[in-house]
Amino acid sequence: MKELTIVGYYTSEIGAMQELHVSPFGAYRGDVPYTSLGRAWS
Amino acid sequence: MIYDAIVIGSGITGGWAAKELTEKGLATLVIERGRNVEHRKDYITEHKPNWQFPLRNRAAVGGDARRAGVPDPGAHGPIPRVDQTLLHQGPPQSLRRGQAVHLDSGRSGRRQVPDLGRQVYRWSDLDFEANLRDGHGVDWPIRYADIAPWYSYVERFIGVSGEKLGLRQLPDGEFQPPMEMNAGEKFVKTGLERAFPDRHLTIGRVAILTQALNGRLPCHYCGPCERGCSTGSYFSSQASTLPPRRPRAASPLSPTVSSTPSSTTPPRTALPACASWTRRRNRCASIPPV
């Protein structure tokens, strides 16, 4: 149930767009300080 | 229409065969079954967010899929997943009670697997000499030195990103800059190589661009490659081997080849033309007249 809740929320538009951050276009930086990110990527 | 060569299948090998034959001046026909997947135009789920898919696009994985008889993508590597995503793109079907997934398990599906796994590793003489050394099987008729220029020829065209290591057992190729490892991968690499100085951990050598190449753009890291790649960042027949030889007037993968000039002599440059199999009842029923 916990997994379904988390997966359901973070694959929803609100979870992915409002809490997290999504963009299909960008560069890949594999190793950056988490605090520099602001919102995490979905 | 008379053809000098007919290529069966437009996958990675077929695409390369068609490219080479066409560039050598042969009028080439590519035959493929099932529905056409045209570069860019048919990547209709590309960049589509998960919440716009039925079941958040997670139905093909795990127990639901197995109960519904859908091949688990994990069991077959990336290929069926590519097919399912690229090929099952009709309007969403309504789900009935008890019907969890509706993926086309893809009798039409093994066609035009566009990208394979994209992992690209050269064999070395450890491989080519293995039979000779251990006495099993037949000795390879070639050695690494024979095939190395061909590796380079292919790699320069398809574009391979990776890290040069100078290892005898895993020869370097014609690499674009490697993708960066993430923090966890770097941590493991550091620990591994400290504990075992003769062992290496390196980023995958993949036919995914980190620099532009022949009109294809570097990867933009959107994530789900299997939904198609309009920028052609991963190597595929659609993006790489077939389009440069595509007739201007129409797609070479259209069911007819009437787009080629109506001349009795096949044009030597505007090919390969492609025909599609019509597949009914799990067998190839007809091929449209060409």
Image: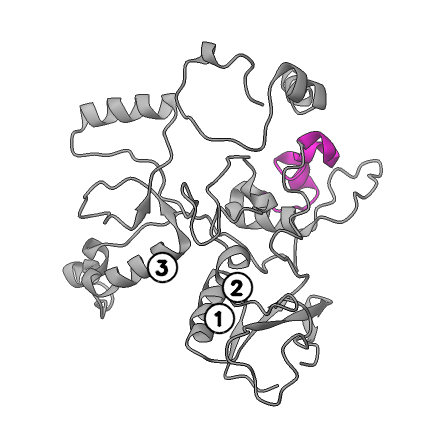
Q: The numbered mark 3 sits on a residue in which chain?
A: B
The reply to whether discs 1 and 2 touch (Cβ–Cβ < 8 Å) is: yes
Q: The numbered mark 2 sits on a residue in which chain?
A: B
Q: The numbered mark 1 sits on a residue in which chain?
A: B
Callout 2: few (<14), some (14-19), or many (20+) C-alpha neighbours within 10 Å?
A: many
Per the image, the residue denoted by label 3 is B154
What residue lies at 29% left-to-right and 63% top-to-bottom?
A: B150
Left or right relative to B193: residue B249: right
Q: Choose between B179 and B191: the one closer to the eye.
A: B179
Q: Is residue A20 above or below residue B236?
A: above
Residue B10, position as x, y percentages in the image: 54, 65
Q: Mark 3 vs mark 1: same chain?
A: yes
Element under label 2? loop
Distance from Cα at disc 3 to Cα at disc 1: 14 Å
Stretch of the chain drawn in magenta: B50-72
**Tag shown at residue B18:** 1
Per the image, the residue denoted by label 2 is B242
* Pointer 1 or 2: first along the chain: 1
What residue lies at 65% left-to-right and 21% top-to-bottom?
A: A16
